[in-house]
Image (cartoon, rainbow, N blue to C red):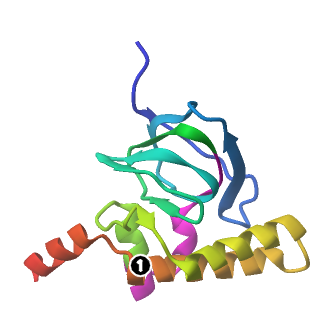
Amino acid sequence: MKNPAQHEVWVLTDRNIPLLSMDIEFEAGKMAFDSHWHREIEILYFTEGSMQVICEDKVYTPQAGDIIFVNPSELHSGRTIDQGVKYHCFIIEPTFFMSLHLDTCDKQIINIANSREKIDNLIHDENIRQLLDRILAERDTQREGYNLFIKGYLTLLMSEACRSYKSSEQKAVEKDDT
């Protein structure tokens, strides 16, 4: 019997860039990806069409321009519905954001990597879309210093996600703990 929740292991091709990015397209009515989890952050940036994405027990139907943020170790799956879909998939190693000497900035990333804090799954944000577009442009052109730009944009993206999209469920838990 096939395990319904597979552990997916990613190997980043360039350890200097903590990012694996793929451009993906599926026809209508196709299973896009089976239920799985992994320790990396996954961002799905939709450019055309729509699909159903399930993160843990929540169902989302992102449209073009929407972003799905999959937290580390979060069970997720996706399938197209009545139309095809195109999206960019970004796999990000969370340890990239941590410094050699742990500091206060690392705490948020460690909490996200260890699932103590979560980012909301569905994001509608023009600033984050622009950062993802810049990452894609640097990836595609690979001009001098592109890896530095990608790292910078990823850091800005995570900063914005932590500031604006920390899960409201998590905020309620933190408030109770306080």
Choose between 85 and 32: the one closer to the eye: 85
Q: Residue at x 66, y 61 (%)?
A: 19
Q: How many marks?
A: 1
Q: Determine crowd level at label 1: few under 14, some 14-19, many 20+ residues with C-alpha closer than 10 A.
A: some
- Find residue 120 and report its horizontal and vertical position in percent: 37, 66
Choose between 42 and 80: the one closer to the eye: 80
Query: What is the secondary structure assignment of the residue under circle 1?
Result: helix
Task: Report whether residue 103 is seen.
Answer: no
- Find residue 136 and report its horizontal and vertical position in percent: 75, 67
Q: Which residues are magenta?
A: 85-107
Q: Residue at x 57, y 79 (%)?
A: 126
Look at the image and say whether residue 86 sits in the magenta stretch. Answer: yes
Choose between 152 and 123: the one closer to the eye: 123
Q: Is residue 140 above or below residue 50?
A: below
- Whether residue 149 sits left or right of residue 122 in the image: it is right
Q: Quadrant of the C terminus?
A: bottom left
Tell me which amino acid carries mark 1.
Answer: Cys
Which residue ends up furthest to the top in the rendered image? Answer: 1
Q: Which residue is mark 1?
A: 162
Q: Is residue 48 above or below residue 108?
A: above
- Find residue 176 and report its horizontal and vertical position in percent: 8, 77
Q: Quadrant of the N terminus?
A: top left
Q: Residue at x 68, y 53 (%)?
A: 12
Q: Residue at x 49, y 56 (%)?
A: 62
Task: Report whether residue 29 is seen.
Answer: yes
- Find residue 87 and report its horizontal and vertical position in percent: 65, 53
Q: Is residue 82 above or below residue 41?
A: above
The quadrant where residue 29 appears = top right
